[in-house]
Each structure stands twice: as C-alpha cells, then as structure tokens.
Image (cartoon, rainbow, N blue to C red):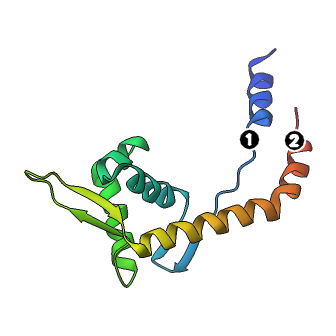
Amino acid sequence: MPRAARRQAQRSDEPVAVHLRVTLRRDVAIGPGKADLLEGIAATGSIAAAGRRMGMSYKRAWLLVDTMNRCFRVPVVAAAKGGPAGGGARLTPLGAEVLAAYRRMQARTVRAVGRDLARLKRRLAR
C-alpha cells in the first residue's frame, strides 16, 4: 500500500472523539486536561505524580492547579508543602464537584453527538 494511502487508512481507523472545553468566563475554563489533572490528584494525592502520569512537568501541573484555584471562590485543590511529613494534595469538596460536573457534561455531550459523529466517520475516505 502506498505511504499516503496507509496514512489515510490509519486516520479513518482512529477513534472518534469529542473534546469538551467549558468556558465559564473569559479566563475560567475547564477541559479534558484540567479534568484529567484533577482526577490524577485525587488518585495519587500529589500534583507532581498527577502531572507525571500525564507526561506534564510539575511546573505546568502546578500552574494549572494555581489557575483553577484562583478562578473559583474557594480552591479546588488543597496542597501541603513537603517536609518531614511529606507534602501532598487533595481535591477540596468544590474540586470534587467541579470534576464530577465536568465529567457529567462530557458524557452527555458524547451521547448527544454520538450518532452524528458515527455518520460522519462512515463518510470518511478510506
């Protein structure tokens, strides 16, 4: 199979995806990356570990958390500095609420557009 045809075939076999980004205000948004980061923090108890799971530097992960914390009335992540007892991070009740709401919206979006996405995918060139 010629190289261009292989590339086209690979593209048509890729899963269809919907990426939801919710913009609450000009500077307040949550999308798949921030949601995955919040999930990682909940699972690992660490901003650094959550970032590593995503292939993200600690600095980038911390900046995303800091942005989310500043955008809401109360923080979405509570972090403790390292030291003899070690550091750590956890979702606050608001953080858990934000994550759960985003995941619900994401699931509803996929259900709402699923048939149209499948129809479009069937019309892709082979």
- Specify the quadrant of the image occupied by residue 123: top right
Toward the viewer: 3 or 112? Answer: 112
- Element type where label 2 sits in the image: loop
Question: In screen coordinates, is 93 left or right of 13?
Answer: left
Eye-nearest disc, 1 or 2: 1
Residue 33's place in the image compared with 26, above or below, is: above
Toward the viewer: 17 or 9? Answer: 17
Seen at 39% across and 71% down, the residue is: 68
Q: Kindly give the residue lying farthest to the front in the view shown.
A: 85
Q: Position of residue 86 (x, y in %)?
A: 16, 51
Residue 121's place in the image compared with 126, above or below, is: below
- Specify the quadrant of the image occupied by residue 114: bottom right
Residue position for label 2: 124
In 3D space, how far apart are the residues under numbered discs 1 and 2 (Cα atoms)? 12 Å
Seen at 16% across and 59% down, the residue is: 81
Q: Position of residue 18 (x, y in %)?
A: 70, 56
Toward the viewer: 61 or 103? Answer: 103
